[in-house]
Image: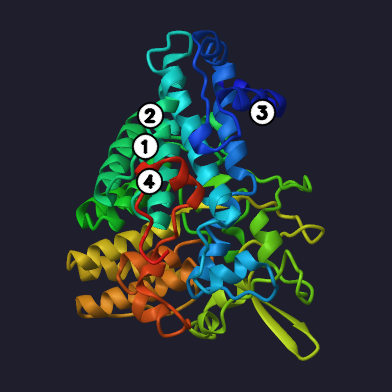
Amino acid sequence: MILNIFKKSRLILIVILCNVITSCEDFVEIDPPRTEVVRETIFSSDQTAIAAMNGIYVEMRGFGLFTYHSVVPTGLLSDELTYLASSEQNVDYEANDVKINSSELFSSFWQLPYKLINNANGIIEGLTSNSQISPDLRDHLIGEALFIRAFVHFYLTNLFGEVPYVTTTDIETNNSASRVSVDLIYDQLIADLLEAQSLMYDDYEFLDNERVRATQFAATSLLARVYLYSENWEGADQQSTAILERPDLFKLEENLNDVFITTSEEAILQLATQNSFEIEGTTFLGDFLVINRSPGPNSTVGAFPINDNLVSIFDSSDNRLVDWIGTFVSGAESYNFSNKYKNANFFQNDPAEHTMLLRLAEQYLIRAEARAQLNNLPGALADINAIRDRAGLPDTIFNNQESALNTIYLERRKELLVEGHRWFDLKRTGRADAVLGSVKAGWQPTDVLLPIPEVEILNNSNLAPQNLGY
């Protein structure tokens, strides 16, 4: 019965309920549902509760943080991508000179994320102690909302540093929310994810085995990442192991071209994709990263080639160089581009692709790094060689912790290229100044954080002071 409800929830209902939950105004001006009549209408049945949750995924897969901005701008901020056109915003990303009054900074990196968080909080509040929803479904949906709340806050703190951790829809509380320390944010992330783990389904049967909604595995995978970032090596090892010990569900795709398609067995969580041109199975990342014509000065797509230095780190026998990096040649010009997502508008849409949010290869890399930090070098070596073996490379060796970590960082750069990890990796491992300072003119140590949008500080003085350097 629940499966049928999931499958029958129609987009029009999703959008209506999503708009009821929260408006599209500023985070500081959001007016969430305040009356019991509205709340009871949204959460009066299994079908309407599922539709409300589906609405959040519709927003997530739109042109926003998880389908473009966590990958392309961060690729420019780091040393992954270069920019060939003339958009001022993208020029600023590449120069690490983001302006405090940037409209994209406000809308895509701040307003939309907090709108998603507000929606998740609305679901948590609406379902807690709700007796009208099937108990198992109610618990799962609360777990999904907790996961989404944690997932979005994870990106916010890694982009901005100290930010408000919002756990209510109360407008007065949110209008005056203060930034909290990164340590406290990570404590709350862990608490939310542990609770989500305990509530969510531990299979994909409720989605007919598609992997486009969060499950217990998504919470576990993100928790492994959070533990890694917070240097809880034992926790990272344990959580990634919980995923890696499920070969019945997850396995590295032998064919690299199958990793990002809708039926990928490597996927832990994907976003179902249908872009603004309504071409199903085509991601925004394919639209923007695949280069199939010469970029012009006003190009909005295909203007983000891979940095030549990134291409140069691959061995010629590495299958990732062949399958995940494309080359477009036009006359004397040659451009290398990320070819993980191969579908672009009006250019190949079979097999269909989804936007990848969490995948198995990252769990191998997380556990390898955690084990290296714990001086379990044989365990770290086994995990790295699993990744290298899939890439068609011979086993590597290392005999001390320093060489192990350097090898792991290199493999992360290759395996996770242009998936939004590099910018965060350089910062969390303390290598941003050494790496980016040597390749970017005008690099400053304060560039590791984006500025808080100026309009938000003007509206809420508790968000002051501005991040250093802005």
Q: Amino acid at mark 2?
A: Thr
When asked about the image quadrant of residue 374, the answer is bottom left
Residue 364 percent across, percent down from the top left:
37, 60
- The reply to whether callout 2 and callout 4 are in contact (CB within 8 Å) is no
Residue wearing tag 2: 173
Along the horizontal axis of the image, is 462 left or right of 256? left
Query: For the residues carrying marks 1 and 3, which lies nearer the camera in this image?
Result: 1
Q: Residue at x 49, y 71 (%)?
A: 96
Disc 3 element: helix
Residue 240 percent across, percent down from the top left:
32, 52
The answer to whether 79 is drawn above or below residue 347 in the figure is below
The answer to whether 288 is drawn above or below residue 53 in the figure is below
| Marking on residue 15 | 3
Q: Which quadrant: the N terminus?
A: top right
Along the horizontal axis of the image, is 2 left or right of 470? right
Tell which of 84 and 390 is nearer to you. 84
Disc 4 element: helix
Is tag 2's residue or tag 4's residue first in the polypeptide sequence? 2
Residue 217 percent across, percent down from the top left:
41, 42
Query: For the residues carrying marks 2 and 3, which lies nearer the camera in this image?
Result: 2
- The reply to whether callout 2 and callout 1 are in contact (CB within 8 Å) is yes
Tell which of 458 and 134 is nearer to you. 458
- The reply to whether callout 4 and callout 1 are in contact (CB within 8 Å) is yes
When asked about the image quadrant of residue 421, the answer is bottom left
Q: Residue at x 76, y 55 (%)?
A: 349
Residue density around tag 1, few if under 14, some if 14–19, many if 20 or more, within 10 Å: some
